[in-house]
Image (tube, helix red, strand yellow):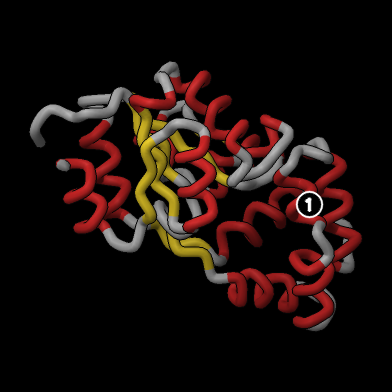
Amino acid sequence: MSALRYDGVLFDMDGVLCDLDDEARLDYLIARGGRDRETLRQAIWGSGFEDEADEGRYDAETYLFEFGVRAGWPITVEEWCAYRSSGMTAHGDVLAFASRLADRCRIGVLTNNGPLLEREFGVVFPELGPVFGGNLWCSSRFGARKPDPRVFVAACELLGTPPERTLMVDDREANVAGARAAGLEAHRFTDLPSLVRFVRG
């Protein structure tokens, strides 16, 4: 790769570094005696619960308890990690590209998720650590969620790169717009070849 015009690149997780299949996650809960599919879907994602977790309204223990209430049984950390990873398929090619970028700039993960995932990244998505080291951040630590521009600015501070020299790679247009509003450059991810072309400029 030629010289980069960025000091840092932030990657979204779900939809960029991995595929996320919500139906597979529901299958996991149902198979373990959880409620019916539509009740689970509404309780977990339709109620605003996960958005609240993304915004940091729960600590990890409270989130796990509240998740268990919605799932229908007192879920353990191990069960929750298995549930979360059951719908995830790593994008090995994107991870390999990020690894190559790490030789030229600082890289990190910025995802809308709660404190339990941030604590359990190594169990839920073990492929991230070897590529990104400790630069794995969930929105909950910032008290807001993407596309709030404050999240992107705070992540740049942790990454140690100025927003104007940082690229955000995200699959959601609203988050791309939020990153740009915060002063970052941003790319809406659709596939790796398009990302490579964008980075190479």
At 52% from the left and 64% from the top, the residue drawn is 20
Please determine whether, in this image, residue 136 is positioned above or below residue 194. Answer: above
Is disc 1 placed on a helix, strand or loop? loop
At 88% from the left and 53% from the top, the residue drawn is 66
Q: Nearer the viewer, residue 84 or 98?
A: 98
What is the three-letter code of the residue carrying label 1? Answer: Thr
At 63% from the left and 38% from the top, the residue drawn is 139
Q: Nearer the viewer, residue 44 or 128?
A: 44
Q: Nearer the viewer, residue 153 or 81?
A: 153
Occupied quadrant, residue 15: bottom left
Camera sees residue 35: yes
Please determine whether, in this image, residue 5 is positioned above or below residue 181. Answer: above
At 76% from the left and 81% from the top, the residue drawn is 37
Q: Quadrant of the C terminus?
A: top left
Circle 1 is placed at which residue position?
76
Q: Position of residue 174 (x, y in %)?
A: 54, 54
